[in-house]
């Protein structure tokens, strides 16, 4: 039963001329004064969500993006800040990219945020998808096998440091602690200071390829899974739900279908589906322009990726359209009653599912995001048992 509604903001600044015919991604460049507006934008979205009874505000860790799409490099710092500006909203790390951290620094920083926000910071880990980010920090990304090996060892260390008062580790990438002399003795174990006070640590990870290895690793640590794309291809496919449940069963956990998972949608509410599609089309296309070349949309061919980088070719080229995404169920568009109907069908199909994310594509301006989150909270969330809307006149 769906009772929790979240939203994700990846950190994009307001921008003009979006869509296939708009400014090419690689031609965008903003000065620092505009890039830092992502922080005010995050504050305003968080305050809106807190007032309206949303459960978790997820943000994404990214680096070195003067193009303005993902401008928040440290989720844990901003989580502490936002927790002090809100009352109940949880702040989710979607996601801390482990290969860009030393695992013990990430563990320490999360533990500090856990304490300072009284448990309102939700941990999350990912492997990364920008070579400009991951490789700049000295870790592999193009070599996916090396990237996964590093990531898994790092996450093993993080959970060991969370759960054990003292520990040691020897692996392919890390020997912790190094066997060096310290105040008259040789180090054999080390303790994380501080450790999180809210144990076990709730942790989330994106599910992309849904390989048995990846799902088994999530099950090993009890990591929950976030599935983007709604019910379109690459999203909440039935096989992914079953594979996640089966991986946990191999670890002795009996989960209902959809349990410990969240399904993410982009959405736009309007009086009719046609009006919603027209209003959101440019944002949908800008999002695809940004993420398609990063190979996060598997159905795209090399020719399509090349075409969408050229505003003179993209509008008339054979590229994905928002109408197709809406038809496939990956983008919720239309009046509230239609969105409620779609989510109710999802709820019926996956009895263990209790959490859904509703967000907006990169390029969507702050005013639209805030207005749409308000309308969703007031006109969609009340249809779901347990979802509380705290908005009131004058709030």
Image (cartoon, rainbow, N blue to C red):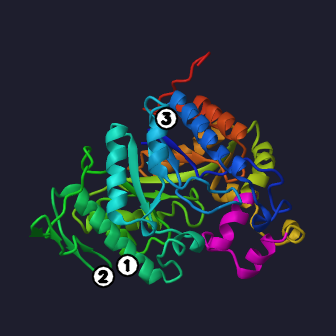
Can residue 216 be seen?
A: no
Figure check: 224 above or below 299 = above
Residue 172: which quarter of the image? bottom left
- Residue 302 is covered by the magenta coloring: yes
Query: Mark 1 or mark 2, which is nearer the start of the sequence?
Result: 1
Say which quadrant the N terminus sits in: top left
Residue numbers of the magenta segment: 286-310
Determine the CA span between mark 1 and mark 3. Answer: 41 Å
Query: Is 237 positioned to the left or the right of 125 in the image?
Result: right
- Residue 149's tag is 1
> Disc 1 or disc 3, which is closer to the eye?
1
> Disc 2 or disc 1, which is closer to the eye?
2
Query: Mark 2 or mark 3, which is nearer the start of the sequence?
Result: 2
Kindly identify the residue that appears in the image at 24 percent across and 48 percent down. Answer: 199
Kindly identify the residue that appears in the image at 18 percent across and 74 percent down. Answer: 180
Figure check: 151 above or below 61 = below
The residue beneath circle 3 is 384
The residue beneath circle 2 is 172
Expressed as whole percent of the image width and height from the top left, the position of residue 120 reads: 38, 40
Say which quadrant the C terminus sits in: top right
């Amino acid at each position: 039963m769906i009772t929790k509604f979240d939203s994700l903001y990846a950190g994009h600044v307001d921008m003009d001329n979006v869509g296939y015919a708009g400014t090419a991604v690689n031609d965008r460049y903003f000065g620092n004064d505009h890039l830092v507006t992502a922080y005010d934008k995050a504050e305003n979205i968080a305050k809106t969500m807190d007032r309206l009874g949303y459960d978790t505000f997820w943000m994404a860790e990214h680096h070195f993006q003067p193009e303005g799409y993902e401008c928040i490099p440290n989720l844990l710092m901003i989580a502490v800040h936002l927790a002090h500006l809100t009352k109940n909203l949880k702040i989710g790390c979607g996601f801390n990219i482990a290969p860009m951290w030393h695992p013990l620094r990430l563990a320490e920083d999360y533990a500090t945020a856990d304490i300072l926000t009284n448990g309102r910071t939700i941990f999350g880990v990912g492997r990364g998808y920008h070579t400009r980010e991951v490789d700049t920090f000295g870790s592999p990304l193009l070599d996916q096998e090396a990237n996964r090996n590093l990531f898994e060892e790092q996450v093993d260390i993080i959970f060991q440091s969370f759960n054990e008062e003292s520990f040691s580790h020897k692996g392919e990438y890390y020997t912790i602690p190094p066997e060096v002399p310290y105040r008259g003795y040789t180090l054999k174990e080390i303790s994380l200071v501080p450790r999180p006070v809210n144990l076990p640590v709730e942790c989330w990870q994106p599910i992309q390829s849904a390989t048995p290895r990846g799902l088994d690793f999530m099950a090993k640590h009890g990591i929950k899974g976030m599935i983007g794309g709604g019910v379109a291809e690459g999203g909440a496919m039935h096989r992914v739900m079953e594979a996640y449940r089966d991986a946990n069963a191999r670890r002795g956990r009996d989960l209902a279908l959809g349990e410990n998972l969240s399904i993410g949608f982009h959405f736009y509410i309007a009086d009719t589906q046609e009006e919603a599609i027209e209003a959101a089309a440019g944002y949908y296309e800008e999002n695809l322009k940004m993420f398609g070349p990063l190979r996060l949309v598997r159905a795209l061919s090399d020719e399509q990726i090349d075409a969408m980088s050229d505003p003179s070719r993209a509008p008339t080229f054979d590229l994905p359209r928002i109408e197709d995404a809406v038809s496939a169920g990956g983008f919720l568009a239309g009046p509230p009653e239609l969105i409620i109907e779609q989510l109710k069908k999802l709820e019926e199909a996956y009895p263990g599912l209790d959490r859904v994310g509703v967000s907006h594509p990169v390029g969507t301006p702050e005013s639209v995001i805030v207005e749409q989150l308000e309308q969703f909270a007031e006109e969609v969330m009340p249809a779901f048992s347990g979802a509380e809307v705290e908005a009131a006149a004058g709030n």
